Image (cartoon, coloured by chain):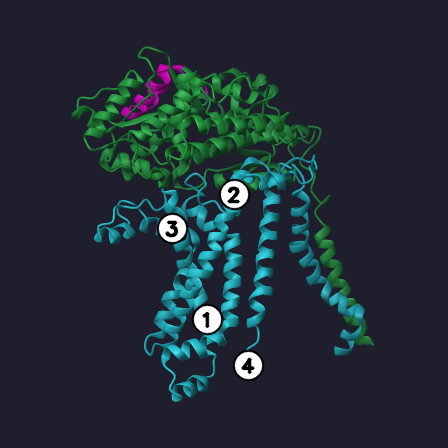
Chain colours: A cyan, B green
Amino acid sequence: MNKALRNPLIYILFVLPAFILFLAFFIYPIYTAIDNSFTSWNGISKDVKYIGFDNYATAMSDVAFWKSVKNNVYFILFSCLVQVPLIVIFSLLIANVKRLKGLYKTAVFAPSIMSTAVIGILWGFIYNPDFGLMNQLLGLFGVEPIYWLSDKNWAMLSILITNAWQWTGFYIVMVLAAIISIPKELDEAAAIDGATGWQRAMKITLPLVMPIISVVIMLSIAGAMKAADIILVMTKGGPAGSTDVMATYMIRYAITSFKHGFGNSIAVLIFVFTMIITALYQVLIARRNERIEY
Amino acid sequence: MKKKGLALLMSLLFVSSALLSACGGKGAEKPSGGTGGAAGNEPFEITIRHTQVGESKKFRLALLNDVVSKTEAAVPGLKIKLDAVDSEVNRKEKLRGEMAAGKPPEVFDVFGSPDAGVYAKEGLMLDLTPILDELGIKDKFTTLDPFTHDGKIYGLPIGGSIEGIFYNKEYFEQKGLSVPKSLAELEQIAEAIKADGKIPFAQSSKDAWIPLMTTNNLWSYYAGPEVTYGFKTGETKWTDPKVVEGVKKHQEWVEKGYFKKGELGFEYADMRNQILSGEAIMMMDGSWANSVFRDPEQAGDMVGKIGYFNLPPVNAGDPVVVMQDANNGYGFSAEVANDPRKLQAVKEFIKNMWTDEMQLRGLKEDGVLPAMKMDLETMNSTSDDPLMQDIFKGVSEIGKSFPAFDALVQADVNTALSMGIQQVIGGELDAQKMLENVQAAQEAANATEE
């Protein structure tokens, strides 16, 4: 068989089925999205008119679009600056507990196996201005009821908290797996040398799990750029578009209005922005953390 | 060498079969039964895409099944396949995909505006005008506006609705309040309710179409219902002072605290709950909401305690102007015209579905107002439920009706208006500025169409 694989023709034939699938389900859709983005296609008509960069110009000059981009940036910043530190802290805590580790792992992982629709409804109750848990708790400290999902000043934060709650557990389990795979000797040696728990966490564990944290950040960025479901369930982009991200902007301003050409241009912009951000992250930050040597 | 040859052959077979299966499809369809009408009793099939899914639509499904049986019995060889799909999925995904591929089912659930207009423009929907003339039912509908494009009718509404105010009758009686005759009287009632610590109007504005029911009715009173027809043609403007006055009235109600604080975060069901819990006293909604207030499982002990009246005119005695619409119904594939037997089946389906009997069944079993013209007495005879009687009275009082604005303006304008009303409710914009934005969207949409 090895001999057969050395024949380039057979090699190509083996690769071809996967390549065809890749072409059909990845390259072709991207190509058609890019192609359609230069048209005023309504998603139905056979008559497709090319309009150059008009769709892109429309998006770029629309205040609502930039508002949605800004919300995507909030998603990324919240993920990287709030969610990731929490993930690391909880991972370190769970890795070091002596009892009921399994329970903690299961408990933090549970939200990530729930559907977004269920989570949206669940947190809708928590945020309810009349009887919601949040306002009940804040009420104990004399805080006036907050209209979490109705007030444009709070709605985005409410979604970010819910989204973080949904996915933090999933990433904790990833980081936890990396922590557990670190040879115990390293930690023990440091302990014998007199390092405190804090020092061992910061100087031994954290540097060794940086590649995984880097992956978590990458996944968070990608997740933040394509976020849509949680917003649709919780606020539908409202109030008055204040929680629209690029994907929900695309649905609101393009897809529901039979403007598929414009919708495709937004999809391409999401793709391009995601590529740029992830590439920048890779080049500027992630590459420095790639190698680990025990 | 043998092994190598076998591997090569196997790979070739796999790749070629994958390619062949990928290329298959076109030209592989079976010819549909009969082409010249001479096929006699040879079996043929048509598909009806409907959205009667779930417990709440069981009566409507039973009605459809009866029509299907009658149609099958009348057309030799006809087999009707029912394809049930959730309404939103059908509207936003499945039907659109099928339309894009040029292969919609023969009969399908469709919204008149803007959907049927877009599909009709592409020649994908059957022009029903000659069929309706032949069956003599063209003038029997309350309105066919949402399904009419360039003077041709492309679909038929399954039911109708009006928009008005549901109210807590028991509370009105206790407080000595009576049904208002003018907007000023309505505002007095709202003030009295507010002073009593209750919410005058239940309203959920997470979905903008809900508060827009109030806005649409108000600007239609102040500027006249005809004004909305002119936005698309440029004859009227959203910034016309009378339109602004109407929207300002809605803004004024928000500012006076006639709606519950935080309404922008409430779901549609929440406003019904506000009425049912007694927290709010009145609610602007479509007549379809009667099903909730008549159902003991949903309304509990509030069954029989909810009434209905039309939004009163600005001045007492002026004609009552009410949104009366029929935007959802059935459309038919243009392909049907190429097959006389399918065309016959479609005619038979229309003949059986749009009858007084079926419309009354819809009204009686489901509380859906008829899409076909019907006198008050006939309607009254279907239900002695007090709420339904109130709604029938509401229909009888209509001086002038108009279709919902979204049937008359482009989708982009609807989006701008939806955004705008939420901004007004949220206190971000005033009515004037909001309508300037809507007018800008209207002009852009009009320019695109030109």
Type of residue at label 1? Answer: Val
Mark 3, chain letter?
A: A
Type of residue at label 3? Answer: Ser
Of pointers 2 and 1, the one earlier in the residue sequence: 1
Both marks 2 and 4 on one chain = yes
Left or right of B130 in this view: A95 = left
Both marks 3 and 4 on one chain = yes
Task: Using the rendered view, name the quadrant where residue A78 is placed.
Answer: bottom left
Residue under numbered circle 1: A175
CA distance for labels 1 and 3: 25 Å
CA distance for labels 3 and 2: 19 Å
Q: Determine the secondary structure under disc 4.
A: loop
Of pointers 1 and 4, the one earlier in the residue sequence: 1
| Residue range of the region highlighted in magenta in the rendering | B372-399
Of pointers 1 and 3, the one earlier in the residue sequence: 3
Residue under numbered circle 4: A293
Of pointers 3 and 2, the one earlier in the residue sequence: 3
Number of disc labels:
4
Q: Which of the numbered marks, if any, corresponds to residue A115?
A: none
The residue at the point 44 percent across, 78 percent down is A203
Mark 1, chain letter?
A: A
Mark 1 surroundings within 10 Å by alpha-carbon count, few (fewer than 14), some (14 through 19), many (20 or more): many
Farthest top residue in view:
B317
Q: Determine the secondary structure under disc 3.
A: helix
CA distance for labels 2 and 1: 33 Å
Q: Which of the numbered marks, if any, corresponds to residue A249?
A: 2
The residue at the point 66 percent across, 32 percent down is B335
In the depicted structure, whether residue A14 falls above or below residue A196: above
Type of residue at label 2? Answer: Tyr
